[in-house]
Image: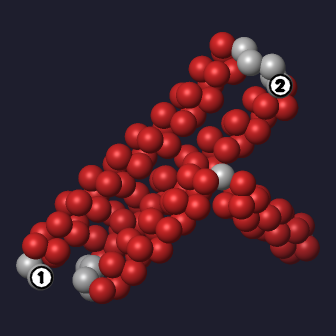
Amino acid sequence: MIDFQKFIKSTTFAIKGIGSMIKSENNARIHLLASVLVISAGFYFQLNLQEWLWISLAITLVWILEALNTAIEAIIDLVSPEFHPLAGKAKDIAAGAVLIASIFALIVGTIIFLPKVLLL
């Protein structure tokens, strides 16, 4: 049987986590602004279904990896308050994953929006 109270409680925690990430992480706020701008541009240019799917994938991928990066950094700061080379390496790799996703999103956005902007 599905326990809807537990589901609502866990969803509330997840939303709280997203809010905490946006409040504490400058890059998350940059991603939020970029997401709003890209979605707005998508409506302006009347993207088709396939274009929306690619844009949605790119935005979601960046957000997922930013959340994981933030969680990894928080865990590392908890268990290794003093600098340790392996802690630094883990943080750098997690940040690199966000960078890779951001580059992918930039490529997708360029492929979709550049031809539309050039027609203006």
Quick one: SS at disc 1? loop
Which residue shows up at 33% across the image and 78% down it?
Answer: 42
The answer to whether residue 79 is visible is yes
Identify the mark at residue 54; answer none if there is no mark: none
- How many numbered marks, from 0 up? 2
Identify the mark at residue 81; answer none if there is no mark: 2
Tell me the kind of residue under disc 1.
Leu
**Quadrant, the N terminus:** bottom right
Q: Which image quarter: residue 39?
A: bottom left
Say above or below: 70 vs 55: above
Image coordinates for residue 18, horizontal then vertical, percent: 70, 61
The one nearer the camera, 26 or 101, is 26
Q: Which image quarter: residue 53?
A: bottom left
The one nearer the camera, 14 or 4, is 14
* Residue 105 appears left or right of 51: right
**Quadrant, the C terminus:** bottom left
Q: Which residue is mark 1?
A: 120
Q: Dot 1, crowdedness within 10 Å: few (<14), some or many (≥20)?
A: few
Tell me the kind of residue under disc 2.
Pro
Disc 2/disc 1 C-alpha distance (Å): 52 Å
Q: If you read the primary sequence from the N terminus, does the residue marked by circle 2 or circle 1 appear first?
A: 2
Quick one: SS at disc 2? loop
